[in-house]
Amino acid sequence: MRFFLLILFLISGSQAWSSADLPDSTAGVSMQSHWGERPVRADSTTAHFAEQPKPGWEKAVLVPYHILGIPFRIVDHAGHETIKMMDRWGIFDMPPSEHVGLPLPYGVYLLPSISISGLEGFSYGLNFRRPDFFGQGNMAFMTVSSSSRHSDKLAGGTYFNMGDRLGLQLGAGYSELPLTRYYGLGYRSSAGDKSYYNRMSRWGGAELDFYLGRQLTLEFRTNYSTIEARDSRYEMDEGLSVVHEGNLPYGFPGESNGWTFRSVLVRDATIIDGRPQDHGFQKASISFFQSTDKTDLSFIQYSFDVQHFFPLWYTERTLGLRSFFTRMHNMGTDDIPLTRMTTMYHPNSLRGFSDLRFYGEGNLGLSAEYRWPIWATKNRKGFGIDAYVFSDSGQVFDRTSEIAINHLEFSAGFGVRLINNDGDFLGRFELGFSDEETVVTLTFSQSFQHHERGLLYGKDPTRRP
């Protein structure tokens, strides 16, 4: 029986194999179908699927499309590669990295820096860090940068950890802004009077920081500075001495030299600066300036900064409110020169106007920000991006009697904030709008909770209150 079944299997298999070698029975024969007679296979009756040729008008449209798309593809590729590079360097702490940047010899780390502002335009440069500089917890820092508006900067400093409650900063630097804008003095300055001048500053100083406990820090700083104001070598037709001929501000052109002594008391109860949900931040400072040049110039300046954060009804939604006030009192017989006057400068700025837009002997401002998370890698408390809308109002003044609602300037805008895994702030990109201009900002510092080691990181003390 098994032999008989084997014979049947072999016979059926040979028939199947032979049938596979038979020619196609439908070849050369027309067949009937539901839609009618199907013609005999031939090149003329067989469809070959291929990409259809584009009409001439479509080709003409695609040429400018591809040309205009080149910058966007370059930005997309550059952004993708930049994110990958930043991830490899440990900026996002994925995987965790002890120090951020490209390792160099002698324990130095290199990190490229970019920023965008209305004052300096697109800035690019290099930052060098040396952690544990001559001891655990110390730091050495140097920055060099240039910008699309021809500004240059070279600055640096050191920080020495002198115990749990005491730190020492040393710093020096040079900064030049060849296209600093000037519209006039006081709140009445008009956008139609825009002019340019060259502002160059040099400084060096030291600061002691005492941590007092209960979120309180006391700082003592002294620094020597030189500021020059000259006609710009750019935009000469709109130079300050041309546009404001016959009404030049005191100290222009000229140079101011002198010592500044400053004390600051800071209370920061917010714990984190990326997504604070409640509590507040307060800062009060008083400084004294004494000239060392031929002028009889000395003045006292005091400044206040009060902030508070309110949790809203949705998770991680926050409303931040801020107010600041600065006042100068001239104690000398000479007027305060242009370069020493109070101005709107980060963090005391109106974000719809470029920094150094207004000049006076005092300023004040009110700001509000509504923040909410829009993207996170793992959870809403981890690394991610928050969106925010803001509104700023403020003015400069020479006398307190000039403070009035109808003298205030207003600006508003929106942006995104980059937050790291620890809930701390990394950077922001925003658009600010006013009745004069639109300001694009990309920076790694913020207006709220702006308290950092300024001398160490090369911040120009002559621009800040």
Image (cartoon, rainbow, N blue to C red):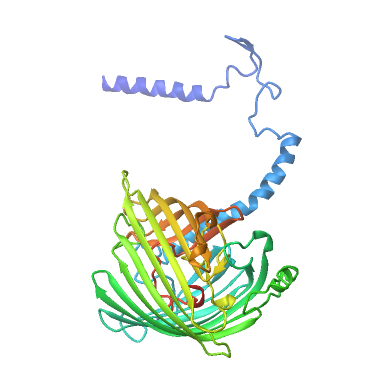
* Position of residue 274 measured from the top left corner of the image (x, y, whole percent): 36, 59
The residue positioned farthest toward the left in the image shown: 214
Identity of the residue drawn at 46% across and 60% down? 365
Identity of the residue drawn at 32% across and 47% down? 312
* Quarter that holds the N terminus: top left
| Residue 78 seen in the figure | no
Identity of the residue drawn at 67% across and 74% down? 248
**Which residue is more in the foreground, 231 or 293?**
293
Judged left or right of residue 148, residue 304 is left
Judged left or right of residue 31, residue 372 is left
* Position of residue 142 measured from the top left corner of the image (x, y, whole percent): 47, 79
Q: Is residue 408 above or below residue 41?
A: below
Judged left or right of residue 296, residue 249 is right
In the figure, residue 10 lies in which quadrant?
Answer: top left
**Which residue is more in the foreground, 397 or 85?**
397
Q: Is residue 16 above or below residue 178?
A: above
* Position of residue 345 measured from the top left corner of the image (x, y, whole percent): 51, 67
Identity of the residue drawn at 36% across and 69% down? 283
The residue positioned farthest toward the front in the image shown: 401
| Residue 48 seen in the figure | yes
